[in-house]
Amino acid sequence: MSETRIQLIGGGLAGLMAAIRVAELGHPVDLFSVVPVRRSHSVCAQGGINAAKNLKGEGDSTWQHFDDTVYGGDFLQNQPLVKGMCEAAPGIIDLLDRMGVTFNRTAEGLLDFRRFGGTLYHRTAFAGATTGQQLLYALDEQVRRYEAEGRIRKLEGWMFLSAVLDDAGVSRGVCAVSLRSGEIRAFPGDATIVATGGIGSIFGQSTNSVACTGSAQSALFQQGVHYANAEMIQVHPTAIPGEDKCRLISESVRGEGGRVWVPKTPHDARDPRTIPEAERFYFLEEWYPKYGNLVPRDVATRAIHKVVHEEGLGVDGKAMVYLDVTHLPREMLMRKLGGVLEIYEKFVGLDPCEHPMKVFPAQHYTMGGLWVDNETQATNVPGIYAAGECDYQYHGANRLGANSLLSCLYGGMLAGPAAVRYARNLTVSAEATPASVFAREQKRQEEIYDRLRNQEGNESPIRIWREMGETMTRHVTVTRYNKDLAAADAKLAELQERYRSINLADRARWGNQSLHFTRELGNMLVLARLVSQSAILRDESRGAHYKPEFPDRDDERWLRTIRARYEGGKFQFEFDPVDTSLIPPRKRSYKS
Amino acid sequence: MAEGKTIVLKIKRRAGPAEPARWEEFAVAWRPNLNVIACLIAIAENPVTRDGRNTTPVSYESNCLEEVCGACAMVINSRSRQACSALVDQLEQPIRLEPMSKFPIVRDLVVDRSRMFENAKRLRCWVPIDGTYAIGPGPRVAPERQEVAYALSRCMFCGNCLEVCPKVNENSDFVGAALLNQVRLFNAHPTGRMHAHERLQAVRGIGGVQDCDNAQNCVKACPKNIPLTESNNDVNRQALLDAILGWMLR
Ligand SMILES: Cc1cc2nc3c(=O)[nH]c(=O)nc-3n(C[C@H](O)[C@H](O)[C@H](O)COP(=O)(O)OP(=O)(O)OC[C@H]3O[C@@H](n4cnc5c(N)ncnc54)[C@H](O)[C@@H]3O)c2cc1C
C-alpha cells in the first residue's frame, strides 16, 4: 500500500481543519490527540472570531482588519500572510455557518457581530459565550463524518513523543505513546502537521487547558525544528487565580463599570466591603486618569503586577487585586454580564454582585511558536508542518482578541493542502523507508521512558512543575528585567538537574498519568528556558514584551524575528528581518 | 472552615479493568476555593494515604477545568458531575469519589466513554456540507431558532445523563439522552433536516428512542441545563412519524 498518508498531531481547531482539508483531497489521515478531540482546549474560547464582513454599515474592510492586526501586534508579523488571513476571514465564517455553527443572529436572520478590543468595528461573530466550543464541535462533526467513511482514523489518547527522522533529516512519521496501555509505537506518515496549541502549563496556572503543555513543540525543537519569538507571551489582566487553573474574567466587566482596587494597607484582613473608600487604592484610575479601568490589556496587566510585586499591596498579601462590581445595580449586571459573573459564582462560590472579585493577570496566549514558512506552514524540517497557536506567524508581539480562532482555521486550511502537495512529490514514501529508521526512534523513546520509571531520588514531578510555573510567572511574563530573567533561567537549569532525581510513586505501565506528565515536564523545562533566554535577548519593549530598562520599541535593532535552533544541547539564535512591505511601522499608542 | 484544617477524601481505586476495587482515604490541606481537581493534584504531589501508606497518584481525566470540555465527569458523593466545578466547601466530607459506573473502567476515576462518540457516528450527527470551498453563506436562521439550537449544541458529551439513566445498563442498547439530543439538533438545522430520515432510521435501529421511559434524571444531571426530556420526546415523535409515514412526509 503506497497511498500518501498524512498525520495530524492535535485536534483543536487548527488540527481538525487541516484534517478535513486533507481528507477532502482524498488522502487518509491519522489524527493523534491526547484528549478526545471534542475536549480540546479550543472549547475555552468565549468571545468570538473576527471577520470584516461589514454587515453593520460601518465601512469595515479586510484591509482595516489587517491594519488593526498588524498594529495590535506591534509590527512584528510578516505582513503578506496576515493580509491573506484577513481576506480569507469572511469566507471562513461562511464555511462555519454552513457547517451549522449556532452563531448569534440579527432580526433578518443574518450573522450578528460584536465589538472587541483593538478595533473600532463590529467585526466579531459569536455563538453565545462559548464560540470556541461551538466552532470546535462543528469541525469535530465534519471529522466524524469522514471517520465514518473510513477516511480519517482517530488515535485519541495517543501522545506525540517525537518525529521519526531518517538519515537525511527528513521526517518519515512520528513516535507516540498510548496514555492508556503505555505502549510506545512508531507510525509511518508521509507528512506530519503539528497543531498542539499553546504552552500555558509552563507558567503553572494559566487560562489554558491541562493539555496545553508545549511538550510536542519542545520535542520537535530539540529535534531540529526552529522556534520563533518564544518571548512573546500574552498575559490577560483579569483572571480568577486558582490552584488548578486561572479562569478568565472578561474585559467587558470593566467596560460596564467594574473598578480595580487594593487596600492601601498591606495585608489588610478586613472584609473588603467594610474598607472605607479613603482606604482603598484605585490604582488604575489614579495612574491613568484618562482611561482609568479601561486601559489596554498590557497596560492594566503591568499596573497590577506593579502594585502587587513592587508595592506589596496584593489582597491578603497574595498576588490578587479586587475587581469590584458591587456598587453597580444587580439587575444591570445580570442582564449584561450574566454569563461571565456565573463563572465566578460557580468556581469561587461567592456572588460577585455582593463580594468584590479577586483577580490577577494570568498567562493566556502564546504568540511565538514553531517557525513556519509563510503560506506553506512548513517548518524547516522536510515533512513537518505546523498550524494554530503552536505556530508563530500571525500575531507578532501581541494578539488581538478573537483573532486566534481565525488564525487557527486559516493556518489549518493552508497546512493541509501544503502537506499533501509535499507528500505527493516524495520519491521515497514513508512506507518504503527502512524499518530500522522507525525502530531506532522507538527504542530511543522507550529508553527515555524506562529511565524515568526506574529513576531513584527524592523529587516529585508536581513540585518541580509548580516551581517552574512560579518562576516563569514571576519573572518571565509581564515586566521583565534582565537580571530576573537570568535568575529564572538559572533556576530552570537547577530544576532540570533536579528532574533527574524524580522518583515516581507509580511505576506501572497501565494508565500511569504521572509517568506521562513527567515525560512532558522534561520538555516543558526546555521550552521554559527557551522563552526566558529569548526574552533576555530582546532588549526593547514591544507589544506584550516589556522591559523597563528598555522602555521603547527599537525598530532599528529589533524589528526582527528571533529564531532559535537547538544544537548540541544549546540554543542558537538568528535574527531575521520582518516583512513590513505593506504597512510601514508606526508608533503604537492607544492613548488618543 | 479555617486555614490549618484538612479535607478528607475517600477514593475508589482500581489499578486496571481486571484489578479489584479498593477504597483509599486521603487528607489534603484546606485552602480557599479548592475544587476536587485541586485536591487530586495535591494528592499526586504527595501520594500518601491518610494513614501514612505510600500509594500511587490517582488517575482521572480533565482538560479545560471550566466546565466546557466534559472530560472530568465522575461520581462525587453519589452524584455524577464535573469535578472541576465541584467546590470542596460545598461538599459534605469525607468527599467520596468514584468512577462513573455505566462505562468501562480504565483505571481509578478514568472510564472509557468512546461509546458515545461511536453512537454519534452511527446516528450521523453532523450537517453534511458539499465541501470547504467558498460557496457563499449558510442558510438564514431566525434568532429564536438560533437560541433553541444553541442550548442544544452545548452538549459536552460528559456522559452524566447516561450515568443517571435507569435505561442505560448492561442489558440495553439505549444510546442515552445526550445522543437523542444531538439527533434533535441536527434534524432541526435547515441543511441537517434534509437528512433527518437517515438519522431517525438509525435511532430506531440501534437502542433508540423507544427505550426512554421518561425518568427525567438526565435533565437534572445535565451541567449545561439542556432540555433533554424535551429532546427525547421530540425525537420520539419524529421517529414514530417517520416510521409510519416514511420520508414522504417531508
Ligand atoms: C479562556 C480562553 C478564551 C479564549 N477566547 C478566545 C476568543 O474569544 N477568540 C479567539 O480567537 N481566541 C480565543 N482564545 C484563544 C484560542 O482559544 C486558542 O488560541 C485556540 O483555540 C488554539 O487552538 P489550536 O487548534 O491551536 O489548539 P488546541 O485547541 O489547544 O488543541 C491542541 C490539540 O493538540 C493536542 N495535543 C497537545 N499535545 C499533544 C501531544 N503531545 N500529542 C498529541 N496531541 C497533543 C490536544 O489534545 C488538542 O487536541 C482563548 C483562549 C483561552 C485560554
Image (cartoon, coloured by chain):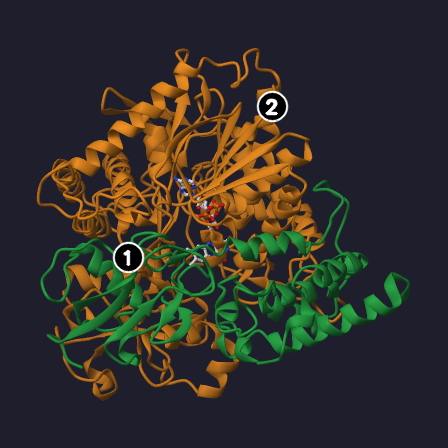
User: Where does the image place residue A418, in percent across and percent down from the top left?
Assistant: 59, 27
User: Where does the image place residue A453, in percent across and percent down from the top left?
Assistant: 21, 38
State whether residue B160 is above or below residue A69: below
Closer to viewer: mark 2 or mark 1? 2
User: Where does the image place residue A85, in percent across and percent down from the top left?
Assistant: 59, 41
The quarter of the rendered structure image containing the C terminus of chain A is bottom left
In this view of the protein, which residue sits in the foreground, A489 or A497?
A497
Give the number of the disc on residue A4: 2
| Ligand 1 neighbours mark 1 (CB distance < 8 Å) | no
Which shade is chain B?
A: green
Protein chain holding label 1: A
| Ligand 1 neighbours mark 2 (CB distance < 8 Å) | no
Residue sitting at x 33%, y 80%:
A350
Give the number of the disc on residue A190: none
Count residues near mark 2 (Cα–Cα under 10 Å), then give few for <14, some for 14-19, many for 20+: many
Q: Are marks 2 and 1 on the same chain?
A: yes
User: Where does the image place residue B87, in percent across and percent down from the top left?
Assistant: 31, 74
Residue identifier under label 1: A302
Determine the image quadrant of residue B228: bottom right
